[in-house]
Amino acid sequence: MVRYILRRLLLTAIVILGAAVVIFTVMYFVPGDPAEILLGVTAAPEDIAAKREALGLDEPFFVQLGSFMYNAFIKFDLGTSWARGTSVMSGLIERLPRTFMLGLLTVLVTVVVGIPIGVNAAIHRGGWQDRVLMVSSMFFISVPEFWLALMLIIVFSLNLGLLPSFGIESWKCYILPVVSGAIAGIANLARQTRSSVLEVVRADYITTARAKGMKERPIIYKHMLPNALIPVITVTGSFFARCVGGAIVIEKIFSFPGVGLYMSDAITARDYPIVRGCVVILAAFTALLMLVVDLAYGFAEPQIKAQYAKSAKRKGNGRGRGRHTHPRGRSPHGGERPLVGARVGDDQAPEDEQPGHESQGEEGDQ
Amino acid sequence: MITQKTRPGASTVALARRPKKEGMWKRTFKRLSKDKVAMIGLIGVLLMILISILAPYITKYSPEEMILTEINSSPSWAHPMGTDALGRDYMSRLLYGGRFSIGLGVSSSLLSILIGIVIGSIAGYFGGWVDNTVMRLCDIIQAIPGVMISIIISLVLGTGYFVTIVALAIGGCSHVIRMTRAQVLSVRKSEYLDAAKTVNCGSGRIMFKHILPNVMSPMLLDFTMRIANMIQFSAGLSVIGLGVQQPTPEWGAMLSAGRNYIMTYPHLVIFPGLFIFAISFFINLFGDGLRDALDPKLKK
C-alpha cells in the first residue's frame, strides 16, 4: 500500500508539472504582443521593444518555459498581472478559499440531497419514488447551469427580492450560486447512487443475509449501503473537481469574487498571466483531488489493495485490465461528465454478462 | 430476467451461430424503438432539427432584419417571443439559431470523436512507447478541467463559430482517446480476432470489419450525449466572452447577449435557455434509451 501511495504521489507530481508545461505552451501561442497590449497600440516602438526585453519576451521559448516552471514550482510565483501589476499568486490565495467554499457547499448539498434520493429510489425500485427520480433527474440534468442561475436571479432577486444576486457579504449570497450549481449534480448523483445500489442488490451476500433471516432494514444499512456507496466517492470527487474547475460561469453570473471571476475578468482584459496562473492552479487542484479520490477509493475498497499487491506478479496480463479495475468494472476516474459512466437501467440478469466485453469503459489503462 | 422472458429463444439463437442476418444495429434499433421515452427524445430532437431547417417557412422575419420601431418589445402576436435590442424578431433568430447551435453540437462532437478515435486506436494498436506517451499526455490533459482547455484554446484561436467548434472538440477529446484505446485493447486480444487472423484476414479488414464495429457502439453513445454537453459548453464560453458571439444567431451567444437586459427584458434570456434546455433534454432522453439498448451486457 505504501508503494501504491508513493507511486500515485509521484505520478500526480508529474501530471501537475506536465499540465503546467502544456498550459504554458498553448498560451504561448495566444496572438497579440503582450508588450503592445500593456502599453497600448499608440506606444512608441522603442518603448515596446524595451518592455519586451523587461518581460523577458525576447528570450527563446524554452528559456521562457524554464523560467516559468522555476518560478511557479520552486518560488511559488506565477508571475505578475499585466493590468493590475500585482502578484498572481497573492490574488489567487485571496480568492481560492472563496471558490473552495462555494464548491464545498455545493458538493455538501448535492451529497446530502442526492444520495438519500438515489438510495430511496433503488430500494423502492419501480415504485413512485423511482419513477419520479428517473423522469425528473433527466429534466434537471438537462437544465443549463448558467441559465438556471439567471432564472433564479429573475425569480428570487428581481421579482421576489428575497435573495441577493451578487457579492459574498452574507450567507444569503451563497444560496443562489450553490443551488444553481447543485441541481444538476443532485440529479446526476441520485442516478449514479441508484444504479450503484441496484448493482449491490443482486449480490450474493445480500441473498445470504436474507437467507439467514436478517431483517430488511439492517440488510440495507449494514450490507447494501457501505458497499454501494464506494463508487459514489468517485462521482462526488469528480463533481467537486468540476464545481471548482468549472466555477467560472457561475462566478461570472453572480459576480462572486472567486478564482473564476478573477479569470474571466482577466480574459476580458487580456491579462494572460492571470489566466495562465488560474488554469495551472486549477489543474494542480484537480490532479490532487483525483489523487485523494484514488487513495480514498483504495482504502474503502479492499479489492483494490489486493489487486495492487497482485499486479506486480500479473504484469503482461493481456486483458488490459489495470490495477484500478475491480469486479464491478468501474474506473475511479469514471463520471467525469454527467451521464456518461452512469449505468442506469441495470435490469439485466448478471448471467447476461459476456466476459469479452466486460472491460468496456475507460478502464484498462495501466 | 425480464429480457430473458420476453425473448426466450435468444440464447439458443446465439449458440446456433445463425448467419448474421440480423445485425447489431438492427437489434439495437429494435430494442430502442420499444423504449417509449427514448422515442419521445428522438422525435423531439428530429422536430427541433426540422423546425430549424424549415425556419424560413415558419416565420416571416429574417434573423438579421432590424425593425427599429420595435426594439426590445415583449412577446406579442406579431412577435411571439418579442424582439431584441436591435429590433430583430427573436423567434426567427431562435429558429435559425437551431442550425448554428445543433450544427455546432454535432460537428464539435464529431470532430472530437474523430480525433479521439484516430489517436486512441493508434495508441491501442501500436502499444509500447506510443501508447505510453499518448496515455501520459491524456493524464496530463485530463487534469486540466475541460472548460479550461476550451478557454485557453479559444484564447489562441480567437472567437467565432468554426473556431469554437475546434476549441470544444479539442477540449473533449482526451476522454474519447482513452475510451477508444481501452476498447481497441479489449478487442485486440479476443478470440474472434485470432480466428480472423487464422483464416488469413488482412489487417485492413480486421481493423474495419472486426475491431471498429465493436468499438463503435460506446462511441455512438458518447457522441449522442456529447452533443448536448457541447451546446451547453459553448453557451458557457459565450457567457465568458469567448466562443460564438453576436451577431451569429446561436442560442448560447443570444443568451449571453441577453444577459445585459435581464432586469428589463427577461424574455431575451428565458427563450434561448429554453431552447438549449429542450434540445439537451431530448438528447439526454434518447441517449439514455440508447445506452440501455447498446448495453454490452445485453449483447448476445
Image (cartoon, rainbow, N blue to C red):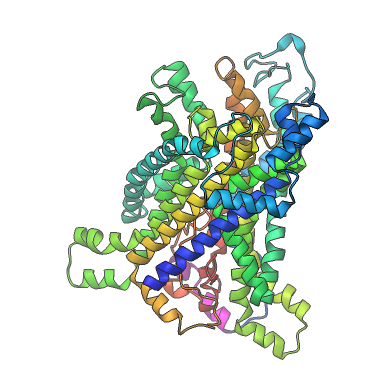
Residue B13 highlighted magenta (yes or no): yes
Residue sitting nearer the eye, B126 or A141: B126
The residue lying furthest to the right in this view is: A45
Question: Which of the 4 quarters of the picture holds residue A106?
Answer: top left
Quarter holding the N terminus of chain A? bottom left
At 62% across and 71% down in the image, what residue appears? Answer: B132
Question: Which of the 4 quarters of the picture holds residue B117?
Answer: bottom right
Q: Check the image and report above or below for B244 versus B227.
A: above
- Residue B145 seen: no
What number of labels is visible?
0
Q: Residue B8 location in percent, x, y?
A: 49, 73
Q: Residue A351 location in percent, x, y?
A: 44, 75
At 78% across and 36% down in the image, what residue appears? Answer: A49
- Side of B10 relative to A43 (left or right): left
Residue sitting nearer the eye, A115 or A176: A176
At 59% across and 84% down in the image, what residue appears? Answer: B16
Q: Residue A194 location in percent, x, y?
A: 38, 55
Residue A12 highlighted magenta (yes or no): no
The residue lying furthest to the bottom in this view is: B198
- Residue A77 seen: yes
Q: Provide the major secondary structure of the magenta segment.
A: helix
Q: Check the image and report above or below for A82 versus A158.
A: below
Q: Check the image and report above or below for B158 versus A193.
A: above
- Side of A196 relative to B123 (left or right): left
Residue sitting nearer the eye, A131 or A100: A100
Q: Residue A174 location in percent, x, y?
A: 40, 30
Task: Give the magenta-colored segment's residue range.
Answer: B1-15
- Side of B189 relative to A75 (left or right): right
Residue sitting nearer the eye, A62 or B209: A62
Question: Which of the 4 quarters of the picture holds residue B91?
Answer: top right
